[in-house]
Amino acid sequence: MEEIRLNVSLLRKRVPNLTTAAKNAGMRPATVSNLCTGKIDLGKAEVKTLVGLAELANCKIDDLIIRGEKRKMIETKIKALDFFAPLVKGGTTGLVARPGMGQVVILAELLHRFKGKDLKTVFLAPTDEHPELEGTIELADQITRGLEDTLEAIRRFGEQAVLVTDKEHVDSGLLFELQEALGNQDSTTTLLVDLSGKVSDDDFPFGPLETVWQLDADLAARHQYPALSPLYSASSILDERDADEQHFQLRQRARNLLRRYRELRSIVQSQGEGRLPSAEVETYRRGERLEAYFTQPFYVAEEFTGQAGKTVPLEQTLSDVAAIMDGRTDEQDVAQLQFIGSL
C-alpha cells in the first residue's frame, strides 16, 4: 500500500498561522496538528477536513498529499532526543520550555554537534537583547539579522543549512516571508526556540511541527539533563512509522514504563518505597534506572560540570534501553547510570 502524508511544508508556507486559521474555519486545531505530526493517519482524515485545509492553502487536495516519501532523521547522538523525538531532516522542530530549564544549553550542544556532521547553521538573531545567548549564538556558522542576509546564507549552504531562530520571527511573519522567498528550494531544517518562555502556555506555540521537544519542569528541578519530557515530546518520524520498527516498539515500551514510574514516584516521595505494592517495585526501579540513563554529559558544558561530553549512536541507545527494560541492569546502582554515555 502506498505511503501518503500531509504536505506540512506547503501548508506552513501558505497558512503561517494554521491552527488559528483552522479554528476560524470551523476545524479542530488538535485534529489539524495531529494530521501534521502524523498522529492521525492521513488516510483516515475526514474529506471535509482535507477540503478545508486545501481552501485555506488555496490549492488542490492532491497538492496536500505527498506519496511514497519517508522522512529522514538527523542523528544528534543525544540519547533522549534521538530516542523519543528524532530531528526530522528538512522539517521544523520546536523547543518548548520555560527559562532556566536548559533549553539554551541544548541549543548550544546541537550547534556544536552539527559542525561534526557537516551541517551549516544559520542563526537568525532575535531583535531583542538576550544575554543568555552569549557564547551560544557564536557557535553558529553564520549569524544573520534580516531577511536578505538569511536568504543568502541558506541558499549558499543549500541542503546542509539548519536555520535556528526565535519565536519572535514566527510571530512577526519574517519566517513566513523567508519560506515564501525560498519557494521550492526550501528543504531547510529549522529549529525554533522561544526565549521568552511563553510557549509553555500555548497548545500549539509554533504552529505545525515535524518534531516537538518539550522540556519537563520536574526533570529540570532534579537536574536530570537534558530535561526532555519522554511523554510529551514527539516526532513525525516515529508517529508515522518512518523509523525502524524496533525503535517504534521500544519507545512505546519506554514511555509506558516511565509513565507508570512517574505515578509510583509520587507514592515513594510522600510515603516511602516501602508503601509500593510488591508487584510494582520492579517497575519503579527499572523506571528509575531508565530515567537516569537518559541523562547525558554535553561537550559545551564540560567546563562547568567537569564531565567529558558523550556521544551515543541511536543503535547503541536502542540496545541499552532494551537491556534496562529487560532487567539486565537490575543489579546496578542508579548512580552508575547517571550522566554516562552508553552502558
Image: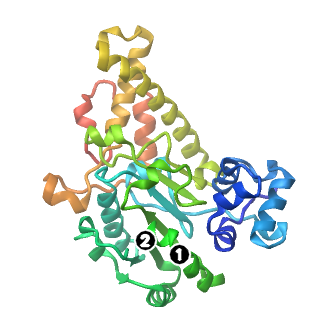
Q: Position of residue 268 (x, y in %)?
A: 32, 18
Element on which disc 1 rests: helix
- How many numbered dots are placed on residues in this image? 2
Mark 1 is surrounded, within 10 Å at the Cα level, by few (under 14), some (14 to 19) or many (20 or more) other residues, namely many
Give the image location of residue 38, x and y in percent: 67, 52
Residue 9 falls in which quadrant of the image?
Answer: bottom right
Instruction: Specify which label sits upstream in the sequence, 2 or 1.
Output: 2
The numbered mark at residue 3 is none
Residue at screen point 62% across, 69% down: 16
Q: Residues within 10 Å of mark 2 (few under 14, many from 20)?
A: many
The reply to whether the C-beta atoms of the residues labelled 2 and 1 are less than 8 Å apart is yes
> Quick one: quadrant of the C terminus?
top left
Instruction: From this view, report whether residue 50 is shown above or below residue 341.
Output: below
Task: Residue 92: give x, y in percent of width and height.
Answer: 54, 65
Query: To which residue does mark 1 refer?
Result: 175
Residue at 55% x, 37% y is 252
Q: Secondary structure at mark 2?
A: strand
* Residue displayed at 24% across by 61% down: 299
- Determine if residue 273 is in view: yes
- Which sits in the foreground, 247 or 263? 263
The residue that disc 2 covers is 165
The image shows residue 169, relative to residue 154, as above or below, that is: above
